[in-house]
Amino acid sequence: MTLYYEGSDGSRIDLMSDGIYAQDPENLTANKWEYSTISGVNGLGRVKRFYKDTQEAKLNLDIMADNADEFNQIMYKLHRTFDRDIRRMKPGKLWWNDFCKEVFAVETSQNEFDELFEAVNREVTFISVYPYWVRRITYQYGTNITNVDAGLDYDHDYDFDYGMEEITEVIQNDCIDAANFEMKFYGPIENPSVTVGGHEYEVLTTLAEGDYVTVNSLTKKILQYDAYGNVENVFHLRNRDSYIFEKIPEGETAIARSKDHMLDITIFDERGEPEWI
């Protein structure tokens, strides 16, 4: 398996090699739902809601180096990376194969220090305020498609029609339920939009060549980037007549878009625990 910590600046610490060896990685996969209840008729209660609160997990790392300089470098890198994310209030990411979870390393402690062999056991406590393991699955829709809706055949019948200026394709959501997403519209285009299962997502803006705009349902942000890397918050330019952060439904769903523009849709596969293998 692959297990590493990615700092908020993009730096990476492998937790399974190079002198750092996680001893109990399964501790990271603990999954817990909080719940609240209300009293019902005749004293029978019921669950009002389930939710996830901030979760904590501890990981034991065996640090083993070939010499004192290497040992000190490893320990300093761990300390610097973890504390930098804390000071900047920007979470790092724990990666378990292709799933990641945003975390802060809030506590560390050491025991069994062996100066002769440059080794120590370090316990790290991580907290996650959004305790989901997330895998990103991206679908790309280009402009090099000549077929329009009349020439496409699907296994399902959809209860809406599309005009000939649009193409119809599908998106597959194999997540447990409706999924959060990020859409990325590429310029040049006027008022980029896409319809997913009859629901429209539209930003009332103009994108030049090299520009793009992203719509993220998890962060509730809509950001426009120009060809020079400048970023603008265009949340106020969303089409208010159709909720732009509506999750992508589970299963196979038809989408419709203009045949003249490019679009990426990234589905966030959010789980309480990652896939083990």
Image (cartoon, grey):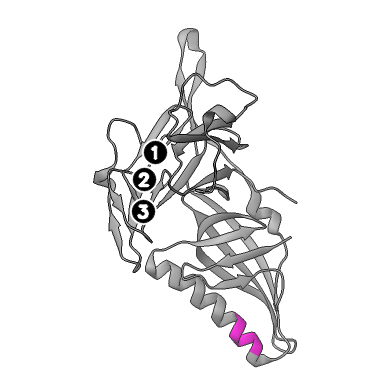
SS class of the residue under badge 2?
loop
Q: Which residue is mark 2?
A: 220
Between discs 3 and 2, the one toward the N terminus: 3
Question: What's the magenta bit mostly, secondary-structure-wise?
Answer: helix
Query: Where is mark 1, residue-wise?
Result: 245
User: What is the span of residues highlighted in magenta in the rendered image?
Assistant: 70-74
Of the two numbered discs 3 and 1 in the rendering, the one whose residue sits closer to the viewer: 3
In this rendered view, identify the residue nearer to me: 68 or 162: 162
Q: Is residue 90 above or below residue 180?
A: below
Mark earlier in primary sequence (2, 1):
2
Crowding near the residue tagged with mark 2, few <14, some 14–19, many ≥20 C-alpha atoms within 10 Å: few
Q: Is residue 276 left or right of residue 9?
A: right
Mark 2 touches mark 1? (CB < 8 Å): yes
| Secondary structure of the residue carrying numbered label 3 | loop
Identified by mark 3, the residue type is Pro
For residue 144, above or below residue 67: above
Q: Which residue is mark 3?
A: 188
Q: Nearer the viewer, residue 14 or 69?
A: 14
Quadrant occupied by the N terminus: bottom right
Residue in view at x 52 percent, y 76 percent: 79
Q: Nearer the viewer, residue 222 or 259?
A: 259
Question: Is there a contact, CB below 8 Å, between mark 3 and mark 1?
Answer: no
Residue 126, x across and y down, in percent: 54, 59
Residue 209 sits in which quadrant? Answer: bottom left
Spatial separation of the CA atoms under disc 3 and disc 1: 23 Å
- Which residue is depicted at the point 61% across and 59% down? 95
Q: From this viewpoint, which residue is outermost toward the front? A: 146
